[in-house]
Structure formats: C-alpha cells, structure tokens
Amino acid sequence: GTRRRACIGRLAAVAGTAACGGCTGSDAANTAQALSDLRNFSIMLEVHQMERERYPSTEAGLKALVEGGQIPSLPQDPWGRPYVYRLDAGGEGYLLLSAGPDGREGTKDDVTRRGPEAASRVVEPQDGVR
C-alpha cells in the first residue's frame, strides 16, 4: 500500500549512495555516509520482512535485496569495501556493518546498525559453513 510505496521511494536513495563507494573525503564524512547507507538498508530489510515475513539469512545477505528488486546492485561502503549483514539468532533481528576506515571488523571505527531496535545476539559463521 501507501506505506510500502513510501518505503520503496526512500530506498531509491541507496542507488545514489552506491555511487559513493569510491568517494574520497574525511573519515567523518565517510562515516556519515555509511550511517546513511545502513539506515537505508534497514528500511529495505523491514520491507523484505513485511513482504516475506522473515529477514534474509546471513548466507543470502544483502544480495536478497538485489534479488528482490529493491536495489539494482550491492553498493560498497565509502571506503570501497562490501557492507556486512548478519541475521541474529532466532531470525528476529540483524546486524549491518561497515568495517570503517581500517577495514577490520571488531575495531572502534566500525560503523554498525542493529535492527529492529530490540535485536538479540549475532550468530557468528562457523568454519566450513557458508
């Protein structure tokens, strides 16, 4: 309905942010861009959840948004690396992440967003499981 069209209209912004994958600028500006991208992904993931009654699996990742026609391609973060998506245990929440300027997950410069607001613990991939 109207809510879905409004969400999809806001999702078009991600296509514009995808072009910024190789942009230059200060870490603060790049961090702000990454946060904006993660907010847009959150909106798209909520639409995905409303339409399919589940979030994409960790394995499907953000590619599920491409396959669902919500974005034309997978954008990179402002530092030129792929965004990370992980489904929480129980499938009721997720983690979105950019590894930030240093490109290493788990450091203080990571840019993250959990969704929805009350998310549980993240399931870490096991060796040999994809």
Image (spheres, rainbow, N blue to C red):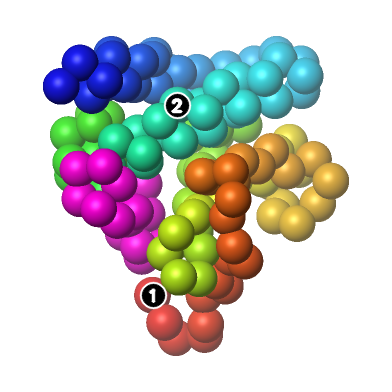
Please give the range of residues in magenta.
49-62
Overall secondary structure of the magenta section? loop
Q: Which is more foreground, mark 2 or mark 1? A: 2
The residue under the point 70% across, 55% down is 105
Q: In the picture shown, does residue 21 fall above or below 16?
A: below
Query: Is 55 inside the magenta-drawn segment?
Result: yes
Q: What numbered label is drawn on residue 59?
A: none
Left or right, 93 with reference to 2: right
> Which quarter of the image is occupied by the C terminus?
bottom left
> Which quarter of the image is occupied by the N terminus?
top left
Question: Disc 1 designates what residue?
Answer: 130
Front residue of this view, candidates 9 and 105: 9
Q: Dividing the picture into quarters, in which one does residue 3 lie?
A: top left
Front residue of this view, candidates 69 and 89: 89
Q: Dividing the picture into quarters, in which one does residue 102 lie?
A: top right
Residue 119 visible in the displayed image? yes
Query: Residue 92 at what x, y percent from top left?
Result: 44, 59
Question: Disc 2 designates what residue?
Answer: 40
Residue 75 visible in the displayed image? no
Query: Is 104 inside the magenta-drawn segment?
Result: no
Left or right, 72 with reference to 97: left
Query: Residue 24 at what x, y percent from top left?
Result: 64, 16
The residue under the point 53% across, 45% down is 115
Query: Residue 40 at what x, y percent from top left?
Result: 45, 26
In 3D space, how far apart are the residues under numbered discs 2 and 1 (Cα atoms)?
A: 26 Å
Secondary structure of residue under mark 1: loop
Secondary structure of residue under mark 2: helix
Q: In the picture shown, does residue 119 fall above or below 9?
A: below
Left or right, 94 with reference to 9: right
Left or right, 72 with reference to 76: left
Q: Earlier in the sequence, mark 2 or mark 1?
A: 2
